Image (tube, rainbow, N blue to C red):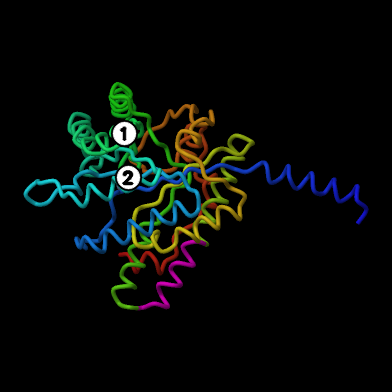
Amino acid sequence: MKPIFFLILLASTIVTFGQKKKICFSIDDLPLVTYGISDSVYQQSLTDKIIASLNRNNIPAIGFVNEMKLYDKNNTAISWQIKLLNQWVDNGLELGNHTYSHPDYNNLSFQAFSRDVLKGEIFTREILNRNGLALTYFRHPFLHVGNSKEKNDSLNNFLSDHGYTIAPVTIDNEDYLFALAYKRAKDNENFALMKKIGSDYIDYMEHKLKYFEKQVYLLFGREINQILLIHANLLNADYLDSLAKMFLKNNYEFVTMEEALKDNVYQTNITVYGKWGISWIDRWALSQGKKGDFFKDEPATPDYIKKLSD
Ligand SMILES: [Zn+2]
């Protein structure tokens, strides 16, 4: 190759590498989705695994906490559960409020729901403040933001009055179904099935990513800073490295929630409301009047996962 062509090739490669897409990893239902396993050693080992993988892959993730999980039956705070949250912050990760008890806003009044929001911020705020950080982000359970304009407005005003920024989701998915199927395969010591579920999970997430990238392009004609939602469970503890690798392969870099939200796509108006718990990309599409056909390519969760997680 002539040196000049080599230089041109090198320069264009550097430009391509310089234009990385951005994604924020948000991890819900902290400290952990336990499937009823209350053993502290088990929970500690999963938390260690999740945090180690986030750090190894330089992912500045944010975890959203349900503080009800920090209490025992007698309503006494469990110190080792609180320690799990401290561990997130000690490792440079962020925390946000995901309500106290993970209620469904579709079935609750604004008054009752907002009480649950405030009840859910006690330890999280304390831990963040002690580390010189502020409690900033709120994530709606089930991504239910209010099924009418009135309910949505009341909650938005309340959150903003209490200093919260809403943490949207763009790459919505059913990781929790894969995770439940995976946990049941583990209970049955079916290691071949665990491996298949893990590998199908990464494929499914890549299809979801490409689908939402395409939808965004159809709506806005450009790429956006994405926000991924996954849950703090066994499957993700085992497969976070593979998930990170998949995003790197697709030319992503990992950013904080604050960095992701600098994209002004997050100022896009949402004008339609329903009971749905869906991606913000879908909300923007519905608000632009898009109908059924627009969403026809959305990857489905495989039937065997639905059966195993039933
Ligand atoms: Zn949740």
Q: Which residue is mark 1?
A: 146
Q: Is residue 192 magenta?
A: yes
* Residue 293 % position (x, y): 54, 46
Numbered label attached to residue 289: none
Q: Nearer the viewer, residue 36 or 63?
A: 63
* Residue 167 % position (x, y): 40, 36
Eye-nearest disc, 1 or 2? 2
Amino acid type of the residue that numbered disc 2 sits on in the rendered structure? Phe
Q: Is residue 256 magenta?
A: no
Amino acid type of the residue that numbered disc 1 sits on in the rendered structure? Gly
User: Could you classify mark 2 by the number of other residues whose Cα lies within 10 Å: few (under 14), some (14-19), or many (20 or more)?
Assistant: some
Is the shortest distance between ligand 1 and the CB of mark 1 under 8 Å?
Answer: no
What type of secondary structure mainly makes up the magenta span?
helix
| Residue at position x 31%, y 70% in the image | 184
Marks 1 & 2, CB-CB < 8 Å contact: no
Residue 85 relative to residue 71: left or right? right
Residue 121 relative to residue 75: left or right? right
Quadrant for residue 183, please give it.
bottom left
| Residue at position x 47%, y 27% in the image | 269
Judged from the image, the secondary structure of the residue bearing numbered disc 1 is: loop
| Residue at position x 50%, y 28% in the image | 268
User: Could you classify mark 1 by the number of other residues whose Cα lies within 10 Å: few (under 14), some (14-19), or many (20 or more)?
Assistant: many
Whether residue 295 is situated above or below residue 199 in the rendered picture = above
Judged from the image, the secondary structure of the residue bearing numbered disc 2 is: helix
Q: Most extreme residue toward the right, as rendered?
A: 2
Whether residue 82 is situated above or below residue 260 in the rendered picture = below
* Residue 161 % position (x, y): 29, 21
Is the shortest distance between ligand 1 and the CB of mark 2 under 8 Å?
Answer: yes
Q: CA distance from mark 1 to mark 2?
A: 11 Å
Q: Give the residues in magenta.
A: 190-202
Q: Which residue is mark 2?
A: 142
Picture quarter with the C terminus: bottom left
